[in-house]
Amino acid sequence: MDQTTSPASNNSSRNRSNTVLLILVVVLLISNVALLYLYMQSKDQGETTTAKLEQVSSDKDNVTHLLEEMLASYDTLQTENEQLTVEMEAQKEQIERLLTQVKSGNYNLAKAKKEAETLRKIMKGYVVTIDSLNQANQMLTAENVTIKQELGEVKGQKEALATKTQSLEGQLAKGSVLHTTTITASALFMRNNGKQVETERANKAEMVKCCFTLGENKVTSAGDKTLYMRVLSPDGKVMPASDSNNRFRFEGVEGEFSATREVNYQNQPVDVCIFWTGSETMRTGQYIVEIYEAGALVAKTNFNLK
């Protein structure tokens, strides 16, 4: 006896198959969404990790650069103070140790950065201290030069006083010393056309000009007079003459002159100008100009350069 499948049975089977397929589709969709979520989460974590690694690398480079800069700065610091030298060498060794640890990656960067900042503050303190010491040494050196010059001049005082003739002493006592009625001094520079122009700028000054009028003096003897000019720089040094043999006696001592000139004096007023041609760069400050004749100060003036 043949068995036949009823339409209701076929529809029921087909419905179950559709249900299974639908369930499979839903499961696949859910799994895909889950996989996509996990992928996106993994990607975000990877980007975060990469950013952290880049930040760590940047921090390491910054700390390394800071430490290397400090080592280079210490190499430029020079001092004759033994205690400071020992202390700075110890600081350099500490920087080198920290730099080695940072480069090897075996040191906490945050801690290393904090220590580097502390070491830099210490280094800045040494810079200020050494600068102050250098300024003090420069002042002492300048004072020492002045003292040596004064000692050199005083050294010849006894000999100069011993060799002064009685005749000169008599003339000086009677007022034979020359004097000036006017005196001016200024710095000059030379234009291309050869014209001399006054200037108050140190960087342009090439010469010093001093003009004055020798007043009437009936007591002193007439004839050729040798006038000496001394130009004293702001630090008290005599501006040197072009001739290395530039020493003369004045006011009982021996010293240097900057320029000299012969003048024929006939006991009447006469205008005179003396020039000093620069053999070294002129600096800013006040310059003192002194004029001497026969060992005595005839006139004195000053001018300023800026």
Image: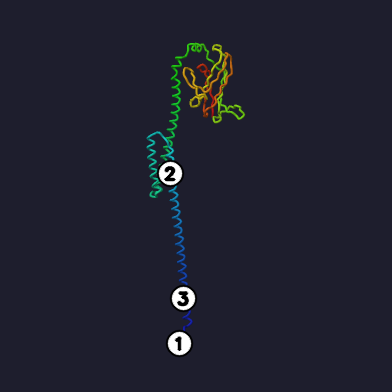
Q: Position of residue 14 (x, y in %)?
A: 47, 77
Viewport quadrant of the C terminus:
top right
Q: Alpha-carbon distance for marks 1 and 2?
A: 100 Å
Q: Amino acid at mark 1?
A: Asp
Tag 2–tag 3 contact (CB < 8 Å): no
Tag 1–tag 2 contact (CB < 8 Å): no
Please identify, in this view, whether the residue under mark 2 or under mark 3 is nearer the observer: 2
Q: Look at the picture and state if 285 lies above or below 31.
A: above
Mark 3 highlights which residue? Answer: 17
> Which residue is located at x 53 percent, y 23 percent?
302
- The mark found on residue 68 in the picture is 2
Helix, strand or loop at label 3? It is helix
Please identify, in this view, whether the residue under mark 1 or under mark 2 is nearer the observer: 2
Answer left or right for 117 relative to 288: left
Question: Around disc 2, counting alpha carbons within 10 Å, would you say few (fewer than 14), some (14 to 19), or many (20 or more)?
Answer: some
Helix, strand or loop at label 1? It is loop
Q: Position of residue 153 (x, y in %)?
A: 45, 21
Asked if residue 294 can be seen in this view, the reply is yes
